[in-house]
Image (cartoon, helix red, strand yellow):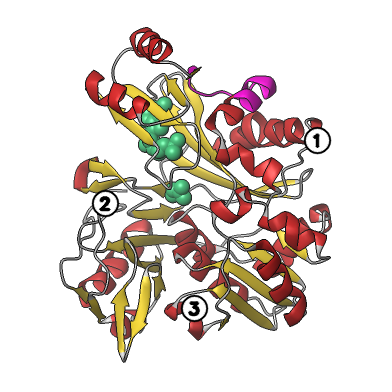
Amino acid sequence: MKTLVIGGGGREHALALALSRDPNVTEVHAAPGNPGMAACATLHPVDPMDGPAVAALATGLGVDLVVVGPEAPLVGGVADTVREAGVACFGPSAAAARLEGSKAFAKDVMAAAEVPTAMARVCDTDEEVADALDAFGAPYVVKDDGLAAGKGVVVTEDRDEAVAHAKGCVRVVIEEYLDGPEVSLFAITDGETVYPLQPAQDFKRALDADQGPNTGGMGAYTPLPWAPDDLVEDVRRRVLEPTVVEMAHRGAPFSGLLYAGLALTKRGLRVVEFNARFGDPETQALLQRMDSPLGVLLLAAAEGRLHEVDPPTWRGGAAVTVVVAAAGYPESPRKGDVITGVAAADALEGVDVIHAGTATAGDDLVTAGGRVLAVTAVGDSVADARARAYEGVDLIEIDGAHHRTDIAAGV
Ligand code: AMP
Ligand code: GLY
């Protein structure tokens, strides 16, 4: 099987690596990819947002499967264009990706499917915003309705800050604050069959002890030894399956990766958000533990015959990912800083250094994005994997870079 991964971040590197380790996969291509992915894939300088160019690349290479990584091309309909060109594509249609692309749409689907989520109001005017803030009270949760690259959500005790964020959005969703540990649970689906993966946890805030601004994610680990035994079944039954059924019912069947961001509150589980693609950086940890051939699973989902393949199986032990972020991330990440130590970290037993925001400049590897590297390690336990991941992080040097020191601590 020949495959093509669209995108060039940490998630796409993790996908390309896992595909390259699937014995059924003979070729891995990526567009545009990143310098780290060059070790496991052939890179092509094609814009992921350009559907016709992606489809032309796929047909030109004769690939059997295209995997679209990021949300922006999915929401923009790149998967539709690839499928129209006759190539199997893992990733939802633009219509189905609205589950991520519009918070208001996601809330509507959840209400119809009776999926537990935070109470919310969609507001179009300043008065509606003020009323909703007062109705739910602090802490205030204010979400931009559209895609905002991880910057759309503000959670704050400060009413003025909540109002200011709402003013910056065209349409805003204000909702009840959900208290409790967050869990990311992904499912591979073809629009009918739903195969949940293992639960993972992401660390969204920039600084230790969950301080600082929200980011795209500073680290992750899997599995969650503290999670209730019936969590995956519960989420499948109450969240994933009803959502997939509701999307099909609306004529927008969801085929691809359905990401449920959950809060385990005192009053039970609630959906915080849906995403329409693999999570970043949870995927980097998760795929290290997947035993099943990834290409076979994704192709079966893309071809609408997921029931023909077995559900994914998992290796024992655990995986931990620690993100190394550029100076200034998340506000204004600095580009062009030289990165050293990657080869030494990658050579450690059980460690893979996944590239997220890197570029080459002459002979140097340099920073090219906010999240630069995702140092990922496997081990017999979370503690073991964590120790290895931080051993890797310690070998990497980038001027001004920062990382959290408490990823998967005390688990
Ligand atoms: P989202 O983009 O919806 O995932 O929101 C980003 C982050 O904001 C989430 O991972 C949570 O940490 C936080 N968040 C979102 N909605 C809520 C909520 N209703 N209550 C508490 N925290 C939330
Ligand atoms: N890990 C958060 C995200 O992928 O949205």
* Residue at x 61% of width, y 29% of height: 105
Foreground: disc 2 or disc 3? 3
Q: Which residue is mark 1?
A: 251
Q: Which residue is mark 2?
A: 409
Q: Which residues are magenta?
A: 108-121
Q: How many marks?
A: 3
Residue 273: x %, y % from top left: 51, 35
Q: Which residue is mark 3?
A: 37
395 lies above or below 55: below
Q: Is residue 113 magenta?
A: yes
* 185 displayed left or right of 375: right
Residues at marks 2 and 1, CA–CA distance in whole angstroms:
44 Å
**For numbered disc 3, what is the local secondary structure?**
helix
Dots 2, 3 in contact, CB < 8 A: no
Q: Which residue is at the front of the view, 184 or 102?
A: 102
Density class for disc 1 (Cα within 10 Å; few <14, some 14-19, many ≥20) is few
User: Any mark on residue 385, and which?
Assistant: none
